[in-house]
Every structure is written in structure tokens, then in C-alpha cells.
Image: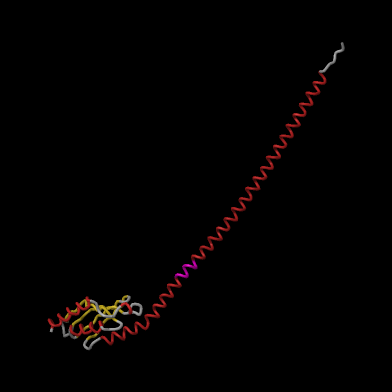
């Protein structure tokens, strides 16, 4: 019976398997490397694109912030302009009113009364002067009470002069503006009437 030696065939088959395994391993390693490199490129491209979008957003945000700042500056300038226009309008309205008020002061000032100072704070007027008697002061207050441009006379101080005849006085009144002229008749209130009665009473005592 003949004998067949199979060792060389098995050895060759083993080498072929080993070579195929190495080739497959190399192909797998190469595929893994290509995949990794492709993934690296893909993620790098995505990161770069996101950075570009972020830069675009930052530039847009800066542009919007600048526009908002310009709008705020325009709003501030608008408010200043409106306030300036309001002041100009008030001054234009008050110019004829001041003329009427000073003309009315001259009309309401009776004989024997001399003003030494007139001060105005807003619509409040303060008169300081000298009168021949307290009766003259009361007449001045009545004239103010019936005035078209003055109202609410209130006597603060009346003093008899120590040297010479006459009395120094200080009284206040309100200016009637075109804005509040329709709020009521420019007549003095109860306070003015009460002070006027007191002034009349003191006049009788001094005379």
C-alpha cells in the first residue's frame, strides 16, 4: 500500500491562510485608518463651519448692538428735543401772560401803596412793599381778588413802621395762566377772605 506525505500540502495551506489573514488585517487596518481620517476631516469641517457661523453671529450681534445704541441716542435726542420744544412753547405762552400780569399789578395797586420787590416762583407771586395804612393793603388784596390775572391773595406780614407813617407788608398771590383760567373764577378762597377780614380788623385797631 503506497504512502502519501501530506505535510508539504498542509504547510502550504497554513501559509496561505496566514497570508490571507494578514491581508485581511491590513485591509481592515487601512479601512479603519481611512474611516478615521474621513471622520477627522468631517468633524474638522463641521467645527470650522460652526466657528464661521459663530463669527457671523458675533459680527451680527455687534452690528445690532451698535444699531440699538444709535436708536437709544436718537431716543435721548428726541426726548431732549421734545423737552426743549415744551420749554419754548411755555415761554411763548407765558410772554403775553407776563405782560398781562404786570399790567394787572399796576391796575390793582391802589394809591398810597408802593411795591419794593416782586418775586415770582412758578405761578406764585410775592409782593413786598410799603403802604400808608393797613387799609391800603386790604384794598390791594381786594383788587387782586377781583383781578382777571391774579388770584388767592394771602397776607403774610404787615408791620407798622417805627419811624414815620406807613406799614410794610408782604403778601402772596397766584398768577392765572391760560392753562388754568378755566378751572374756576379767579376769586380768592376762604383763606384770602379770612386774612382780609383780619387785616381789616387790624386796620381799625391801628387807626
Residue 183 image point, x, y percent: 32, 77
Q: How many numbered dots are placed on residues in this image?
A: 0
Query: Considering the image in quadrants, where does the C terminus appear?
Result: bottom left
From the viewer's perspective, is 110 left or right of 21? left
For residue 75: magenta? yes
Residue that extends furthest to the bottom in the rendered view of this protein: 111
Q: Nearer the viewer, residue 112 or 155?
A: 155
Front-most of residues 181 and 150: 181
- Which residue shows up at 22% across the image and 89% down it? 111
For this orientation, the residue located farthest to the right is 2
Looking at the rendering, in which quadrant would you find the N terminus?
top right
In the picture provided, is 144 more to the left or to the right than 68? left
| Residue 113 image-quadrant placement | bottom left
Q: Is 41 located above or below residue 81 in the figure?
A: above
Q: Is residue 104 magenta?
A: no
What colour scheme governs how the chains and residues are painted in the rendered image of this protein?
A: secondary structure
State the extent of the magenta-drawn residues as a range: 73-79
Residue nearest the observer in this picture, 78 or 194: 194
Quadrant in which residue 20 is drawn: top right
Percent across and percent down for residue 16 are 79, 26
Kindly report the secondary structure that dominates the magenta region of the rendered protein. Answer: helix
* Residue 47, image x, y percentages: 62, 48
Q: Residue at x 58, y 55 (%)?
A: 57
Where is residue 96 shown, x and y percent of the image? 37, 83
Amino acid at each position: 500500500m503506497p504512502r502519501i506525505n501530506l505535510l508539504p500540502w498542509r504547510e502550504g495551506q497554513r501559509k496561505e491562510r496566514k497570508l490571507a489573514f494578514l491581508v485581511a488585517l491590513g485591509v481592515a487596518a487601512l479601512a479603519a485608518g481611512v474611516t478615521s481620517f474621513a471622520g477627522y476631516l468631517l468633524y474638522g469641517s463641521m467645527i470650522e463651519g460652526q466657528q464661521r457661523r459663530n463669527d457671523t453671529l458675533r459680527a451680527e450681534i455687534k452690528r445690532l448692538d451698535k444699531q440699538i445704541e444709535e436708536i437709544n441716542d436718537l431716543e435721548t435726542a428726541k426726548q431732549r428735543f421734545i423737552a426743549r420744544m415744551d420749554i419754548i412753547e411755555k415761554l411763548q405762552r407765558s410772554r403775553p401772560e407776563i405782560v398781562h400780569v404786570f399790567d394787572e399789578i399796576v391796575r390793582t395797586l391802589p394809591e398810597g401803596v408802593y411795591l419794593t420787590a416782586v418775586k415770582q416762583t412758578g405761578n406764585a407771586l410775592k409782593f413786598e412793599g410799603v403802604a400808608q395804612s393797613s387799609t391800603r393793603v386790604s384794598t390791594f388784596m381786594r383788587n387782586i381778588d377781583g383781578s382777571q390775572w391774579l388770584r388767592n391773595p394771602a397776607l403774610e406780614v404787615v408791620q407798622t413802621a417805627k419811624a414815620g407813617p406807613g406799614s410794610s407788608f408782604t403778601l402772596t398771590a397766584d398768577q392765572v395762566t391760560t392753562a388754568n383760567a378755566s378751572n374756576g373764577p379767579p376769586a380768592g378762597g376762604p383763606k384770602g377772605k379770612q386774612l382780609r377780614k383780619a387785616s381789616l380788623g387790624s386796620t381799625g385797631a391801628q387807626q
